[in-house]
Amino acid sequence: MYNSGKFTVVGAGPGDAELITIKGVRALQAAEVVLYDALVNKELLCFAKNAELIFVGKRKGCCTYQQDQINELIVLKALQGKNVIRLKGGDAFVFGRGAEEMEYAASFGIAVAMVPGISSSLAVPASQNIPVTKRGSAESFWVITGTTKSHTLSKDIALAAKSNATVVILMGMSKLAEIVGLFKEQDKADMPVAIIQEGTTEREKIGVGTIATLGEVVRKKQLTNPAIIVIGEVVRHRNQLSNIQQKYQRAKVTA
Ligand SMILES: C[S@@+](CC[C@H](N)C(=O)[O-])C[C@H]1O[C@@H](n2cnc3c(N)ncnc32)[C@H](O)[C@@H]1O
């Protein structure tokens, strides 16, 4: 028998407030408690007019709440009969701990639900005209974390570097030198790379280069977290598209 409280994990999208789903907005409108993370666009909180808003993210690298405390807070509020929303950046099932929190709440007999979000892993490259697959360029893509639970580089990056897939790395900015090394070992120094910081927001920054020039690009553009690293031939599409557009404009002017 469930108590009357409910716990719903909601994906807030990559940053642009318009990139949440309608279902996500409706969940916020019905919320009585919202626990939200640092990567969530705060504009979205205005949909939760009747809710208690609790920030549980990291500020300047410092956790306000540990994961155990967040879990306990969710259960406490839901067992009080509240409709609790956990608003997380992107999609809560992509490096978002959404699954863990749902399991924890369910183990207390709390009804749980999940509202998918638009993950930064796809939306941030897309917003910069970088597709993760493109006929002739990439048949598949990997989405990998740069930093694992034990703070080491994911071993999957070495495997991905051997493939022809597009490689999208989240939380990888502190491991750039190691990532570059792995691709160089595969003779991929000329492979195109884009780094997009705070994609889809007003603060968005992008640097484009190759595996060989990446360090220089990051220094020049002063790129830092939160950022997405996209490695693969698909990065060229951005330039190709812009060349087509410029050619069209020139032809229009001279016509
Ligand atoms: C803990 S993961 C959460 C990912 C999230 N669940 C998703 O689906 O987008 C956080 C990492 O996602 C990436 N990230 C999230 N939002 C981003 C954005 N707007 N621009 C660039 N990278 C972003 C960064 O690599 C950041 O360190």
Image: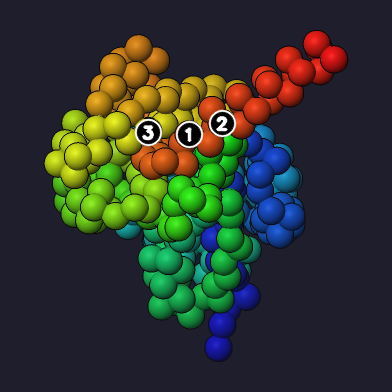
> In the image, residue 144 lies at what x, y percent?
33, 51
Instruction: Kindly report the distance in space between the C-alpha atoms of the residues bearing marks 1 and 2.
Output: 6 Å
First in residue order: circle 3 vs circle 2: 3
> In the image, residue 93 lies at what x, y percent?
46, 60
Residue at x 42%, y 25% (from the top left corner): 208
**Disc on res. 236:** 1
**Disc on res. 240:** 2
**Residue sitting at the far right:** 255
> In the image, residue 89 lies at what x, y percent?
51, 46
Horizontally, residue 69 falls left or right of residue 36, namely left
Please name the amino acid that badge 1 sits on.
Arg
Mark 1 CB in 8 Å range of ligand 1?
Answer: no
Q: Do residues under tags 1 and 2 come within 8 Å of each other at their CB atoms?
A: yes
Q: Do residues under tags 3 and 1 come within 8 Å of each other at their CB atoms?
A: yes
Of helix, strand and loop, which one carries label 3? strand
First in residue order: circle 3 vs circle 1: 3
Instruction: Kindly report the distance in space between the C-alpha atoms of the residues bearing marks 3 and 1.
Output: 7 Å
Horizontally, residue 119 falls left or right of residue 231, namely right
Please name the amino acid that badge 2 sits on.
Gln
